Image (cartoon, rainbow, N blue to C red):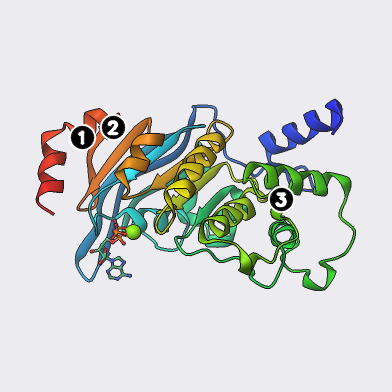
Amino acid sequence: MSAVALLKNQMQRWSRRDAQGRSFGPDISHQTILYLEDITVSFDGFKALNALTLYINVGELRCIIGPNGAGKTTMMDVITGKTRPDSGSAWFGQTINLLEMNEPEIAQAGIGRKFQKPTVFEQHSVFENLELAMSGRKSVWPNLHARLSAQQRENIDRVLETIGLQGHRQRRAGALSHGQKQWLEIGMLLMQDPQLLLVDEPVAGMTPQETERTAELLTSLAGERSVVVVEHDMVFVRSIAKTVTVLHEGSVLAEGSMDEVQNNPKVKEVYLGE
Ligand SMILES: Nc1ncnc2c1ncn2[C@@H]1O[C@H](COP(=O)(O)OP(=O)(O)OP(=O)(O)O)[C@@H](O)[C@H]1O
Ligand SMILES: [Mg+2]
């Protein structure tokens, strides 16, 4: 890509403007990409989230840990519009009220979510999976082999390189290992260029080598975007974590460096009591 094209591409990304030039991305002028305040979610009177307050900074890699049932997945459901809270507020940057949007609108605004089970198109090649995930191409299955622009090709190549699957571009996705499928799915999310990426238990079922590679991948993604990782594997969390948030019974129990939270008496009690 030429320097000018690169710059133009960057500017479009930062401003996230639609074809009419209207801005639709988050206003991150206060360096905070996500504000969750006093979020409560009840299921039949049981509070899965209980006045949860949490902030995520622009470009940070945040790990969320906590025992089973702490509310980690429910928190992601709230951010992505899958679950509506009973009360509280959720803002994407300064101006985007997530509680007024549905799931596709939230994805379009720049929040990508990776579920635990990979959902790639097994019959299609790695390259085609990324092509299908490209903004606006999902609805055009018959046009799968329509000509891609040079820029679209470059975007796919860049993502292939990021997820380490350059050498597998023509392979059927169904033939990939579990770890490679997970990376491909992360790649599919990257095709949408999310500013905030939510990943729920990414290394479950991975080999130690795949786990290590995933740590590198998620670390490399932060900075350019914000990444929130929920994970039970403490060795993995320790290897990537800067700030760790511990959830317990739907609220934040502790927040800090891995060492700080692991030495926190309240955290010790919760984990020992499991
Ligand atoms: N749709 C639902 N209906 C009823 N209860 C639910 C629903 N979704 C979640 N819960 C309950 O809310 C609590 C929080 O669940 P959640 O899945 O958010 O926990 P988690 O922290 O992701 O746990 P895990 O580490 O096991 O994935 C649990 O007690 C769960 O049973
Ligand atoms: Mg969960």
Q: Earlier in the sequence, mark 2 or mark 3?
A: 3
Residue shown at 32% from the left, 53% from the top: 72
| Residue 230 place in picture, x, y as percent | 37, 49
Q: How many marks?
A: 3
In the image, is residue 122 above or below residue 33? Answer: below
| Residue 138 place in picture, x, y as percent | 71, 65
Disc 2, SS: helix
Which amino acid, mark 3? Answer: Gly
Q: Work out whether residue 262 or residue 45 is closer to the camera in this orientation and state it.
A: 262
Nearer the observer, disc 1 or disc 3?
A: 3
CB under 8 Å between discs 2 and 3: no
In the image, is residue 165 above or below residue 30? Answer: below
Residue bearing the label numbered 3: 167
Q: CA distance from mark 2 to mark 1?
A: 6 Å
- Crowd rating for badge 1 (residues with CA inside 10 Å; few <14, some 14–19, many 20+): some
- Crowd rating for badge 3 (residues with CA inside 10 Å; few <14, some 14–19, many 20+): few
CB under 8 Å between discs 2 and 1: yes
- Quadrant of the image containing the N terminus: top right
Q: Which mark is residue 262?
A: 1
| Residue 142 place in picture, x, y as percent | 82, 73
Residue bearing the label numbered 2: 258
- Whether residue 92 is visible: no
Residue shown at 29% from the left, 46% from the top: 65
Q: CA distance from mark 1 to mark 3?
A: 40 Å
In the image, is residue 216 above or below residue 31? Answer: below
Residue shown at 40% from the left, 63% from the top: 83
